[in-house]
Image (cartoon, helix red, strand yellow):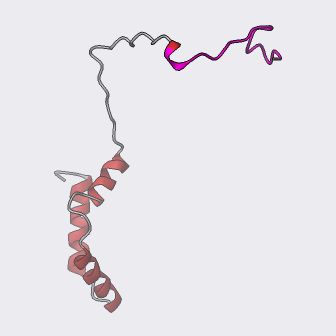
Amino acid sequence: MANIFRVHPPNTTQGIGPVGSMKPKAAASQATNVSDTVEISTAGMLAAKLHGPEGIRADLVQRVKEEIAAGTFETPERIDATVDRLLEELFPGL
């Protein structure tokens, strides 16, 4: 076999033996006091709130679609309440 980029030394061959002849590798040493950490971005936390455990309420989505189509969804009261909730979410205790 040709020596390609010095992967194998020249003039050496390795035979193929039966599976049983392979020596088991020593068990990897087990690390102690190792812990993993996860950091979730602000965008990830907001996405989690949008797709929370309660899931999507299809009946509410349909009702809102109908109100938007009819032009009755956006009212001054709803806009004020939405702005208030958004500000409270972004700036707690404001």
Determine whether 11 is above or below 93 in the image: above
Asked whether the viewer can see residue 23, the reply is: yes
Instruction: Give the x, y percent position of residue 76.
Output: 24, 80
- Give coordinates of residue 59: x percent, y percent: 23, 79
Side of 24 where 7 appears, left or right: right
Residue 10 figure quarter: top right
Q: Is residue 28 magenta?
A: no
The relative height of residue 42 versus residue 19 in the rendered view (above or below) is below
Please tell me whether residue 43 is drawn above or below residue 23 in the rendered image.
Answer: below
Q: Residue furthest left?
A: 93
| Dominant secondary-structure state across the stretch colored magenta | loop
Q: Is residue 38 shown above or below 75?
A: above
Q: Nearer the viewer, residue 49 or 90?
A: 49
Q: Where does the N terminus fall, quadrant-wise?
A: top right
Report the number of discs. Answer: 0
Tell me what residue is drawn at x 27 percent, y 88 percent: 72
Toward the right, the furthest residue is 2
Give me the residue at 23% from left, 56% from top.
89
Q: Nearer the viewer, residue 36 or 63?
A: 36
Q: Quadrant of residue 53?
A: bottom left
Residue appearing at x 26%, y 56% in the figure: 49
Q: Which residue lies at the image location 33% right of the left edge and 14% below the top edge?
A: 30
> Percent x, y for residue 73?
27, 83
Magenta segment: 2-20
Q: Nearer the viewer, residue 24 or 7?
A: 24
Q: Is residue 74 visible?
A: no
Q: Quadrant of residue 52?
A: bottom left
